[in-house]
Amino acid sequence: MGAFAITAKVCRIVGCGRTPPCDMFRSLQKKRTPHFVAPDAGEFSLRRLLREADAPISIQAVNNLPEGAQRRLYQILLPPDLLARFDVRPVSLQGAGGEGCVDFFAQEKPGLIRITACHEPAAPDPFLTLELADNSLNGIDLNLLWLTDPAAPRFDTDVNESGHATQFGTLSRNLPAEQAAMQAGLAPGQVRAGLHASQIVFHALDTFLTMLAHRAVFLEPLTYASAWLFERRGFAYVRGHKLMDDIHTEFQPGGRLYRALDGSPFRQPAQAATVRGRAWAIHDGILEAIGERWDGLRMVRQVGQRAAASTFPDAPY
């Protein structure tokens, strides 16, 4: 997956000075005509938002609002229960000492909002990073969702041994850090253990999308483990369901992927039986054994609905 570069001017609304990592998910394209055409961003106003409740509003249009209005709308994406875990006040977004702990980065063209929340201003990693962006069909893409336990041990899988960013292992890899992370129970792309809070974040996202009159959100999963987890959060496949089914088939005893588990650090035979085990083998390039690569999967989640996709049923994570 290629890196997502921001080239336009970024507007900082309020924050703690954190710069979040690169995108975990690229946007998806939905192959059907949208129900509505979003109002032109230059014509958008709060009055129109109240008057036309069924017309979808773009991220770009929200980013054209005054900063105070932007913040009020984007705060819907921050679950109060999650903020409270880290003593961040849900209204002021300040920590226990009165310092700002949440950053909003709003970019007008293309319409994009990135939110990061830290448990303290000097924290090396946000506990929440969420990025949404407009797509070319008047829809909303989830580019990044990162939930990280700041108290958990850190594994530097995001930088290689020369100190350069790995872009979640897509440009380069830090093999010693990855092995340590795998042994600690992490999945590819993680630097710390997660917060087990994606469910409440998606509830907040549904509320935000409904407020903007959008019916769905789209994403591209970074890893096999991400795709499996998004299935459990009600996502279906726009593209990639067959690949996921093929992976499941070929990891069965006697399958080509099972036979390719050669005992090397990221390809132990026992990995076939777990989601994270398969994810690390796929991260290591094992899909070459079936002439495939991890690329191009696209998923969609309808607001208020849950799809029934299950490509590795009853699997231990």
Image (cartoon, rainbow, N blue to C red):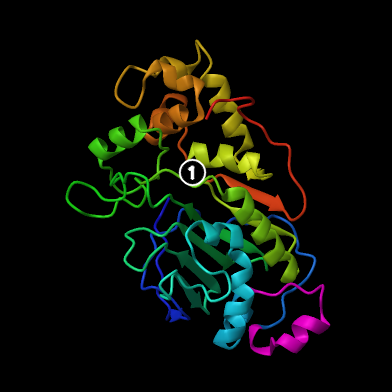
In this view, 252 is above or below 169: above
In this view, 19 is above or below 72: above
Res 72 → quadrant = bottom right
In the image, taking residue 11 as reference, residue 302 lies left or right, namely right
Q: Is residue 306 visible?
A: yes
Q: Is residue 291 visible?
A: no
Residue at image coords 54%, 50%: 220
In this view, 223 is above or below 13: above
Mark 1 lies on residue: 295
Q: Magenta region: which residues?
A: 41-58
x and y, in percent, of residue 63 in the image: 57, 80
Residue at image coords 57%, 58%: 142
Res 155 → quadrant = top left
The magenta stretch spans residue 57: yes
Residue at image coords 39%, 19%: 260
Q: Secondary structure at mark 1?
A: loop
In the image, taking residue 33 as reference, residue 19 lies left or right, namely left
Residue furthest top in the image: 254
